[in-house]
Amino acid sequence: KVYGNIDPAKIRNDPVSKNPTVFGGPYKLDKWIPGQEFDFSANTTYFNGRPHYDKAIAKVITNATAAASALINNDVAWHPSLGESGAGGIRKAKQSSNVVVHTYQDLSYIDFRMNERKGHIFDKLETRQALSSVLDKASIVQAATQGAGAPLWGDIVPASWAYNPNAIVKYPLDVNKGKQYMQQAGWTIGSDGIAVRTLADGCAACTPVIKPGGQQKFVGKIRVRAGKPDRLSAAEIIADQVKQIGMSLTPDPTDFKVFYPPIQKGEFDVFIAGFSLNGDPDDFSTASSAQLQPEHKQGQNWTGYSNPALDQLIDQERATVKATDAETKAARKPIFDKIEKIISGDVQTYMLWADVSSMGWSSNVGGVVAGNGDNTIYYDSEYNVTARAGWFSKSGK
């Protein structure tokens, strides 16, 4: 055993993590300087052949603009998250003769997750439909991402094999329809422009607490990661657009260290966050009732949304296996279509955009090719580490 006797909570600082003895990739770790760099050397026993580079150093650069400049100035040879520097950083990199940029549809997405538990402002389907009817998604995504995002309606992104644009429910932009949905949900816009309703059962979990028969105003906070300008921009635009139907939502930039604990306790109104898929989609952790948190001690279904029909479809999809990968995908895809129709139709989560990401390489790096499947570089850089073994220095330096 290498890790079997280590407490998972302490594994990050355990000596074996800083000086590992087992390596599975083309490079092995020689040195780790926390907060500065990771030094690697070629794994001469790598199953797919020795990598071309003798050594590789991964620099820790926390400032997105500085990281992009390091690539342009040849201080680093590969930047896997160039998109974080924004449209301006990508543009400068593409204009540099020292850099080759690959832009591709990513498997990650950004969404707007509501607390849909009873008594909270987004607890009714009609309220979420009202939100979907008043938001101009295309303009939000363009303004927030400057072209680095593709509008998304379901939680399967265009880069996935399971994506089907015809399986999702899209709510047309219609402010009057949004107002009708609000009325159907029991909300009435007051003289101050903010919607209000009467809660027969009250809401002990709400802030402030609402007594049975008390009045509830549609007032809440949009929790958003501090230091994520695209998400904050989206939150600000959303807050402005929903005023038309009596919703008063205020962006609340929050440090990452304290961002998730209240969400995991169900103590929030709305939050904007990013999620990443792997090559094979799975809605279990984010949409199944079995993964509700804090109702259960695990999972990422923080919304409080529960639907037995959706649970059944998710279980069915996960249990579907055929003789070949192609046959399995063919059998699972129509089930995914039904799942997407429920998630988008019920607005279990309001999807914002799928990331359109960019990576940059020094023009001196050869052997960089696009991945298989959806023909993005994503798989080669993140899921197929053997590709990195094939990279080489054109100059020999």
Image (cartoon, helix red, strand yellow):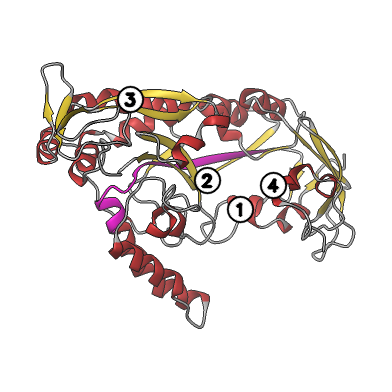
Residue type, numbered disc 2: Tyr
In the rendered image, the residue lying farthest to the front is 211
Q: Position of residue 187 (x, y in %)?
A: 13, 33
Label whose residue precedes the other's in the sequence (1 or 2): 2
Which class describes the residues within 10 Å of circle 1: few (<14), some (14-19), or many (20+)? some
Q: Position of residue 160 (x, y in %)?
A: 46, 57
| Residue denoted by label 2 | 104
Q: Distance between the residues labelled 4 and 3?
A: 39 Å
Quadrant of the rendered structure where residue 102 is?
Answer: top right
| Residue denoted by label 4 | 9
Q: Where, quadrant-wise, is the N terminus in this rendering? A: bottom right
Q: Element at badge 3? A: helix
The residue sitting at 36% across, 64% down in the picture is 336
Residue type, numbered disc 3: Ile
Viewer-side label of 1, 4: 4
| Residue denoted by label 1 | 370
Label whose residue precedes the other's in the sequence (1 or 4): 4
Q: Are marks 1 and 2 in contact (CB under 8 Å)?
A: yes
Which class describes the residues within 10 Å of circle 2: few (<14), some (14-19), or many (20+)? some
Label whose residue precedes the other's in the sequence (2 or 4): 4
Viewer-side label of 3, 1: 3
Q: Magenta span has 349?
A: yes
**Magenta residue span:** 341-360
Residue type, numbered disc 4: Ala
Q: How far apart are marks 1 and 4 (CA)?
A: 37 Å
The residue sitting at 46% across, 60% down in the picture is 282
Q: Element at badge 4? A: helix
Of the pair 236 and 363, the residue shown nearer to us:
236
Of the pair 283 and 260, the residue shown nearer to us:
260
